[in-house]
């Protein structure tokens, strides 16, 4: 009975962590109902492979796709193309070989650059809505300071900052900018092909290579049983992205999941994905979004970007090769992960 209770607590915690990031996806115009397909694909995939590493909403990929694409069509096209490429990489077992080729300094530098992208997105949200975004940032920083030693610090940070932002928005904002999702149903997405989309798709590939290895590896390290294979995780998350984006849904990727630490790690992860999938399918997330300001996620993005990405990944990149890691980080931050990775490899080849 105690084991089942622990499973339930882990499931609830990861669901609570995922839903606010789902709201982030809605702010970028992704549809919630088609995204349910991604979670069901993840549930089926993990059931078959008995993998302990589930997939869910991931702020890094959502923010990158949302800022790299000009509209839903471009965003979903780059997600779909990136999914196809990643599925092939996973199917042929090339993921670890790619990371071994580019080196840890480039991989860590790229993830640090993505952290800066998250911070920039947070600052833009605060600029667009000073009250809701500012309160979200203040609440997130305070919460993180007092809970940083807890394994659930990000769950506390995202929940408290979003709730505080909603309260401030209700009291002080006369013109409320709630999240509105158009065409929230299964509608075949019209794909757009242009240079921006191609670069965006390649950026998605590079970002997911890094996140699958790092997030998937951390999650697997928390588990005491079950299976884990990074290539299986890559195939599952890629198929999930393809099904979701084909109908206008958001990307769903590897995460650091507390379900891996549950007594029944595999089934806790599967149930978590099914629960979020059902929530999306019945359109509960957009209903919540009507009461949530679009900038309420700003504080969480800032904390995630600075304290859980840049602070952790930048030193690792610099420790291997400061010039290569720094070049990768800066170019990634000002352009995208693909160009950042190319710049890092180029710097390495030049002997910097």
Image: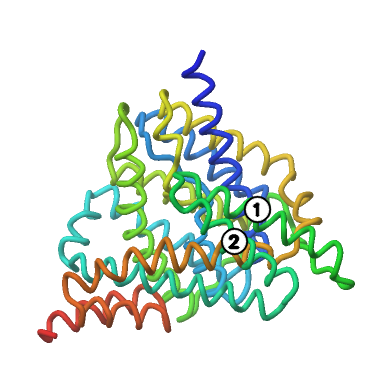
Q: Nearer the viewer, residue 309 or 57?
A: 309
Depth check, front residue: 214 or 339: 214
**270 to 78, vertically: above or below:** above
Residue 141: give x, y in percent of width and height: 56, 64
**Residue 55 vertical placement versus 181 (above, below):** above
At numbered mark 2, what does the secondary structure look like: helix, strand or loop?
A: helix
Q: In this view, does 231 lie to the left or right of 32?
A: left
Q: Residue furthest top?
A: 1
The residue shown at (65%, 36%) is 278
Estimate the spatial distance between the alpha carbons at disc 1 and disc 2, rounded to whole Å: 7 Å
Report the residue that reaches farthest toward the front.
146
Q: Nearer the viewer, residue 291 or 350?
A: 291
Residue drawn 71% across and 65% down?
294
Residue located beneath label 2 in the image: 140
Does residue 122 appear left or right of residue 279 in this picture?
left
Residue located beneath label 1 in the image = 160
């Amino acid at each position: 009975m105690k084991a089942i209770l622990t499973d339930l607590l882990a499931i609830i915690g990861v669901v609570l962590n995922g839903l606010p990031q789902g709201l982030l996806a809605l702010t970028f115009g992704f549809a919630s109902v088609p995204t349910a397909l991604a979670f069901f694909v993840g549930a089926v995939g993990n059931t078959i492979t008995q993998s302990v590493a589930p997939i869910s909403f991931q702020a890094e990929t959502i923010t990158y796709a949302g800022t790299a694409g000009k509209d839903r069509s471009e965003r979903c096209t780059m997600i779909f193309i990136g999914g196809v490429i990643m599925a092939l990489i996973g199917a042929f077992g090339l993921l670890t070989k790619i990371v071994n080729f580019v080196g840890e300094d480039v991989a860590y530098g790229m993830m640090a650059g993505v952290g800066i992208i998250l911070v920039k997105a947070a600052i833009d949200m605060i600029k667009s809505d000073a009250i809701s975004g500012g309160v979200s940032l203040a609440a997130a920083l305070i919460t993180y300071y007092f809970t940083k030693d807890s394994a659930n610090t990000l769950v506390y940070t995202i929940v408290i900052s979003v709730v505080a932002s909603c309260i401030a928005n209700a009291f002080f904002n006369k013109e409320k900018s709630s999240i509105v999702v158009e065409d929230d149903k299964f509608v075949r997405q019209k794909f757009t092909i242009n240079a921006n989309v191609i670069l965006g798709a390649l950026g998605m590939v590079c970002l997911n290579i890094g996140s699958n290895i790092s997030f998937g590896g951390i999650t697997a390290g928390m588990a005491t049983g079950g299976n884990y294979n990074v290539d299986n995780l890559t195939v599952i998350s890629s198929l999930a992205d393809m099904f979701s984006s084909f109908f206008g849904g958001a990307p769903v990727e590897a995460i650091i999941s507390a379900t891996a630490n549950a007594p029944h790690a595999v089934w806790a992860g599967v149930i978590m994905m099914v629960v979020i999938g059902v929530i999306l399918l019945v359109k509960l997330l957009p209903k919540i979004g009507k009461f949530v300001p679009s900038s309420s996620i700003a504080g969480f993005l800032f904390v995630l970007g600075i304290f859980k990405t840049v602070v952790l990944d930048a030193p690792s990149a610099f420790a291997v090769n400061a010039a290569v890691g720094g070049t990768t980080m800066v170019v990634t931050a000002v352009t995208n992960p693909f160009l950042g990775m190319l710049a890092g490899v180029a710097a390495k080849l030049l002997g910097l």
